[in-house]
Image: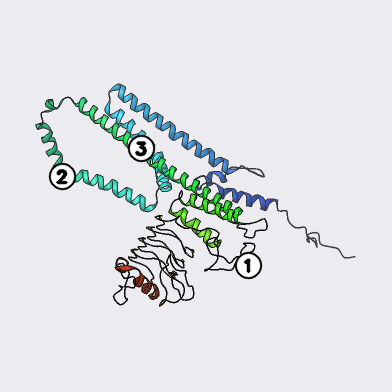
């Protein structure tokens, strides 16, 4: 039998308890949670196998400091009041200075945080510069002797001739009150005007949305196919004429883009037995410029209309009457003005890229005529009427467009064409 030494360790020692280790770690963690000035005091407050929470001690110490500062302020105020009662300057001055310093100790950090929250660094620098500039200006005027001059001037005035100071300040106060009332009334007017404009914009958009829904229900059948019989077309044109006369330029542009993209302004090829448009086999309808029927004919709905600064890209505006209409600043990229009447229209500064003015060839194209049918192969009588129109500062005008405008615009229109028309004869003859 082998005897094991009495002092030998067991072969499978159990792992040591983690209680002491956790206690030490908790104590170190608690030491880190309190301020540095309370760490030494907190570390000594320990009991057997128990550690007093040091965060509470720090809070009690901080609250005690705030209470002591409050009492010091009250004592300083009391000393100042005693000095006032005793008529002792030194006692009152001492209490006032101490109370002021204690108050500033609390006010200045809060003021700094407030400035940091509501002002950016650049704005804080600007505010500081304004304050220093004001102080410097006061000192500069003092050293320049302006205050002495003003004081001397005031002593030379016979104030009894101007009435009492109370009357002067009373009149000045009434003037200031009147100015303040005018300012308040103006601000109310501005706010009311802005609210009215926003409300009108919301109401207009709701009206336009209702129009879109109504036109869709009139022109489409239950299966979503175009079913525009003469009665439906008449109602659609009536609704369109009414709404175009009641919305602003941006609203008119929205309606025109909707009608163009919906192919309601494009002449469609019809089945002359049923009157329905014929599908092109790829999800759309066949276009027929010569004999097709539009769902909505614009006619004279936009004569004299204001369409300035709007987006009319890819809009089909053909065969419409735009006499004296205002297109200044419009985006007219890819717009179709074939057979439109632009007589005396304002097209100053418009984007004219790829705008269609006629069909067929430039050499044989000519403006529309009431006496002749258009020929879409040669371009005869398919062009827009551009007489007396203003094309000043036209943007992205190509050579073909310039040649047509110069040839058929007349003398007044030719004078506004960018690049001039000296090399192109006036085919209009007037």
User: Label 2, on which residue?
Assistant: 143
Residue 165 screen position, x and y as percent: 19, 26
Residue 406 image-quadrant placement:
bottom left
Asked whether disc 2 touches disc 3, contact meaning CB atoms under 8 Å apart, the reply is no
Q: Which of marks 1 and 2 is in front?
A: 1
SS type, badge 3: helix
Q: How many labels does the image show?
A: 3
Residue 64 screen position, x and y as percent: 49, 36
- In the displayed orientation, state which residue is furthest to the right: 1
User: Label 1, on which residue?
Assistant: 279
Q: Quadrant of the C terminus?
A: bottom left
Residue 274 screen position, x and y as percent: 64, 62
- In the displayed orientation, state which residue is furthest to the front: 371
Question: With 162 as the anchor, is 239 left or right in this view?
Answer: right
Question: With 126 as the anchor, is 366 left or right in this view?
Answer: right
Q: Distance between the residues labelled 2 and 3?
A: 31 Å
Q: In which quarter of the image is the N terminus?
A: bottom right
Residue 232 screen position, x and y as percent: 59, 54
In depth, the one of 135 and 174 nearer the eye is 174
Q: Give the residue drawn at x 57%, y 53%.
A: 215
User: Label 3, on which residue?
Assistant: 101
Q: Give the residue drawn at x 36%, y 39%.
A: 187
């Amino acid at each position: 039998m082998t005897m094991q030494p009495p002092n030998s360790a067991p072969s499978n020692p159990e792992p040591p308890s983690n209680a002491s280790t956790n206690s030490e770690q908790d104590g170190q963690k608690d030491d880190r949670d309190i301020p540095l000035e309370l760490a030494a005091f907190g570390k000594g407050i320990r009991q057997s196998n128990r550690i007093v929470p040091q965060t509470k001690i720090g809070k009690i110490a901080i609250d005690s400091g705030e209470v002591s500062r409050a009492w010091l302020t009250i004592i300083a105020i009391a000393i100042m009041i005693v000095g006032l009662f005793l008529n002792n300057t030194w006692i009152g001055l001492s209490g006032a200075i101490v109370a002021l310093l204690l108050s500033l100790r609390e006010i200045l950090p809060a003021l700094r945080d407030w400035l940091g929250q509501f002002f950016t660094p650049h704005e804080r620098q600007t505010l500081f510069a304004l304050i220093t500039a004001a102080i410097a200006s006061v000192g500069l005027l003092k050293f320049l002797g302006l205050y002495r001059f003003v004081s001397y001037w005031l002593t030379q005035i016979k104030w009894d001739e101007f009435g009492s100071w109370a009357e002067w300040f009373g009149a000045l106060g009434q003037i200031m009150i009147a100015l303040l009332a005018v300012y308040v009334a103006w601000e109310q007017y501005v706010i009311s005007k802005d609210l009215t404009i926003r409300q009108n914009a919301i109401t207009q958009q709701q009206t336009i949305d209702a129009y879109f829904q109504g036109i869709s229900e009139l022109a489409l059948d239950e299966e979503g196919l175009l079913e525009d019989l003469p009665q439906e077309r008449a109602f659609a044109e009536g609704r369109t004429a009414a709404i175009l006369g009641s919305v602003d330029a941006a609203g008119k542009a929205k309606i025109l883009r909707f009608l163009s993209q919906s192919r309601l302004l494009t002449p469609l090829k019809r089945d002359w037995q049923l009157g329905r448009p014929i599908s092109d086999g790829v999800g759309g309808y066949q276009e027929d410029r010569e004999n097709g029927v539009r769902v909505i004919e614009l006619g004279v709905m936009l004569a004299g209309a204001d369409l300035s600064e709007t987006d009319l890209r890819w809009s089909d505006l053909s065969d419409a009457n735009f006499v004296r209409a205002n297109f200044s600043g419009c985006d007219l990229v890819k717009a179709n003005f074939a057979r439109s009447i632009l007589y005396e229209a304002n097209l100053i500064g418009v984007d004219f890229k790829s705008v269609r003015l006629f069909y067929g060839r430039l050499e044989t194209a000519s403006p529309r005529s009431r006496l002749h049918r258009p020929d879409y192969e040669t371009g005869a009588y398919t062009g827009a009427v551009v007489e007396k129109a203003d094309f000043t500062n036209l943007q992205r005008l190509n050579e073909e467009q310039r040649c047509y405008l110069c040839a058929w615009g007349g003398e007044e229109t030719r004078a506004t064409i960018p690049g001039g028309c000296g090399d192109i004869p006036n085919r209009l003859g007037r």
